[in-house]
Image: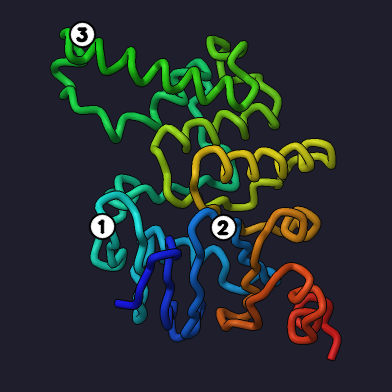
Amino acid sequence: MNNMENTVLSVKNLSISFGGLKAVDSLTFDIKDKEIYGLIGPNGAGKTTVFNCITQFYKPNTGEIHFKGVGGVTELTTKPVHEIIKLGLVRTFQNVELIRELSIIDNVLIGGHIDFKANTFAQALRLPNARREEKKYREEAEKILENLGILERKDMLVGGQPYGILKKVEFARTLMARPKLIILDEPAAGLNDSETLELAKLIKKIRDEYDCAILLVEHDMRLVMDICDRICAINFGKLLSIGTPKEIQQNKAVQAAYLGVE
């Protein structure tokens, strides 16, 4: 295993096929500590499949995925999907996955349940250790909500909240899991221009204040070019180029894939 001193995620020769069709083809890239890293490509390029392989929702046919998370470096392909979040790798979904009937703070607290030490029995009977633990997590959740600027809404139901607020609640829940890497799947989908600008600031703030790297899959190229340190462009599951936003914008292969120009 190569040295991962400054690297949080290392993907090597990743391949997966569905019914003879190669969705990802020998893809290699790495994400550095505290880096905002973009994964871009035209529709059908294999971006979501890459995500699903990293989080072990799909098991790749070949390749290695090393992640420097809780407890050191782990080969993710050896882990079941439910263990991935405990290592500090968390993803958000394109459609906000929140429970409408619960309050904002209760939705955020769900993100902390992976760390709960008290068992279900102790929680149900509200035994002292369970109460102490819940108090600690509630304080942590309130601190995150305050940091994201929505603490005053904590007791409101999630149902009926504006979309921009729901995105923040989802981020807050993600942060409760103390992530080392957050995978964002199309976070700007459904946002207007001013909300997208606010999202850009929020992503940078989360990276800076919570010391985590971010992997971003996004169609909004302005957002990608604005916030990413480096970008990996793929097409038909194959690597086109890796570079800074400026390098990617000037890359002829990337231009051809996106614009259909030779």
198, above or below 53, in the image: above
Inspect this view and state whether residue 169 appears. yes
Image location of residue 84, percent across then percent down: 32, 52
Q: Which residue is mark 1?
A: 80
Residue 225 or 81: which is nearer the viewer? Answer: 225
Inspect this view and state whether residue 21 appears. no
| Residue 229 occupies quadrant | bottom right
Left or right of 201 on screen, residue 168: left
- Quarter of the picture holding the C terminus: bottom right
Mark 2: amino acid:
Glu
- Mark before the other along the chain sequence, 2 or 1: 2
Q: CA distance from mark 3 to mark 1?
A: 31 Å
Q: Which residue is mark 2?
A: 35
Residue at 43% in and 61% down: 8
Few, some or many residues within 10 Å of mark 1 (<14, 14–19, 20+): few
Secondary element under disc 2, as helix, strand or loop, is: loop
Q: Which residue is mark 3?
A: 126
Mark 1: amino acid:
Pro
Q: Badges 3 and 2: C-beta atoms under 8 Å apart?
A: no
Residue at 77% in and 42% down: 196
215, above or below 96, in the image: below
Residue 173 or 95: which is nearer the viewer? Answer: 173
Left or right of 8 on screen, residue 113: left
Residue 87 or 49: which is nearer the viewer? Answer: 87
